[in-house]
Image: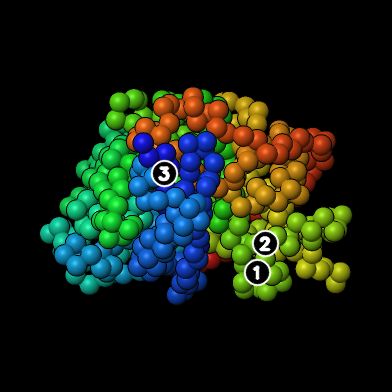
Amino acid sequence: MASFVVAIDQGTTGSTAVVVGEDGRIAGRGYQEFPQHYPRSGWVEHDPLDLWRSSVEVVGRAVADAGVAPGDLAGLGITNQRETTVCWDRATGEPVTRAIVWQDRRTAAIARRLAEGGGDELIRRKTGLLPDAYFAGTKMRWLLDHVDGLRKRAEAGEIAFGTVDSWLVWKLTGGEVFATDVTNASRTLLMDLATLAWDDELLDLVGVPKAALPEIRPSAHVFGTTRPELFNGLALPIAGILGDQQSALFAQACFEPGQVKNTYGTGSFMLMNTGTERLTRQRKLLTTVAVGFSDQPTEYALEGSILVTGAAVQWLRDELGIIGNAAETEELARGIDSTDDLWFVPALTGLGAPHWDPHARGLIIGISRGTSRAHLVRATLESIAYQSADVARAIVEESGNPITELRADGGAAGNGWLMQYQADMLGVPVDVPESIETTSLGSAYLAGLDTGVWSDRAELQRRRRTARRYEPTMSGDQREAILDRWHQAVDRSRGWAVEEA
């Protein structure tokens, strides 16, 4: 029997693929970055063909790195940047426009209009979300309003709108399957969490035709098979799809209500498993589908989405040129005792949870003649911990459950200085697993469950191994004083950008 699975992790700055063996460990990996496009302030775009080509390329690299034959692969899983919106022609399979990335804030005015006249309450009650430019539905609406003739073609069924998973499934199956899973559909503003279906009332409110949308299916489901010519003649079953943050929650074995993980990537995303309970009265956070099975009740999560964390480190590297790579940040942060009251609010594309201010912009305050690049680097790392602490407090407030441990993953979870500081800012232990590439692992695990590589979630629970655990050492009074000062800086960053019509 085939004993490996491969997973595509199509992320914001690059595509990754991993081959995972029966022992739950990564046996092979491939990675490729692709260009980011910033045509205007607050706009972020990708070329959908870059997402597609890089995803296929990294699968080949991962399989070669693992040294396995294609026949050793039982199936393929997909995880993806969730709210990023792709629009393509059904007849040609070619993109109509660049993809609008989840970080993009051009649709803030659309989101504001959706909130008016009772729309805010309708969206919160049915979707667990809130009217914000973050979500895919606003991006679809913007394209329908700004691309000549697109609405008429979409209503006629000539155009496909989807999140990145549906774009990849379409391309992998040669246009035979147009589908998404419930976790990605729950990020659009268009799906009712109770029915797990596109909702006519929401479609009318947002202004998106149902004819342009994919079929919604469970996360653990065989969506179709890949075209044989893509992977050395092998037609792989696409056996599991999860949005990237739900995938990380699954890989971290947060299977019980109350368990919490935080993924430190381009942004950071903290999720608490709420089991089968659907929370729809929250004001600062989101309710999202955690995972969907065809033969079990759907499970949900409470989520706090931080728009810019790792992207701020990337900004230090690419735009400011003050570091050569992210690994330098730990040594620089350890090399000084403090930031000397320098604060960086990385609202480079607005603020997400718990503030939800699309008009906030990045702020560096407290600069003095003695400020060095080390101070700015440390302030950047500290901002990641502060934003996560704000979300953690909102989760406790809105769930009514304490957080007793944070399971951390993503690239920055490898930064020991940051993880210790995060434990200090939370006042609870931070647990880092052996593999921090959990977004990739989660969809691989799901595909492996669906194809018989693993028997059940209890087996996956046993596969999770802790690599490092960080215990808090800071006093509560010191923590509160630091966070109070941070909130002063956040307040000064808010409401800066001028809203476009």
Q: Nearer the viewer, residue 320 or 67?
A: 67
In which quarter of the view is residue 310 placed? bottom right
Picture coordinates of residue 487, whole percent (x, y):
69, 49
In which quarter of the view is residue 354 placed? top right
Picture coordinates of residue 399, whole percent (x, y):
53, 29
Position of 223 relative to 296 (above/below):
below
| Quadrant that contains the C terminus | bottom left
First reached walking from the N terminus: tag 3 or tag 1: 3
Q: CA distance from mark 2 to mark 3?
A: 30 Å
Asked if residue 275 can be seen in this view, the reply is: yes
| Quadrant that contains the N terminus | top left
Position of 426 relative to 40 (above/below):
above
Residue that badge 1 annotates: 317
**Amino acid identity at mark 1:** Arg
First reached walking from the N terminus: tag 2 or tag 3: 3
Residue at image position (67%, 49%) is 414
* Disc ID at residue 5: 3
Task: Report helix, strand or loop for mark 1.
Answer: helix
Residue at image position (29%, 30%) is 294
Residue that badge 2 annotates: 326
Q: Nearer the viewer, residue 248 or 7?
A: 7
Q: Nearer the viewer, residue 122 or 320?
A: 320
Left or right of residue 419: residue 335: right
Left or right of residue 271: residue 427: right
**Amino acid identity at mark 2:** Ala
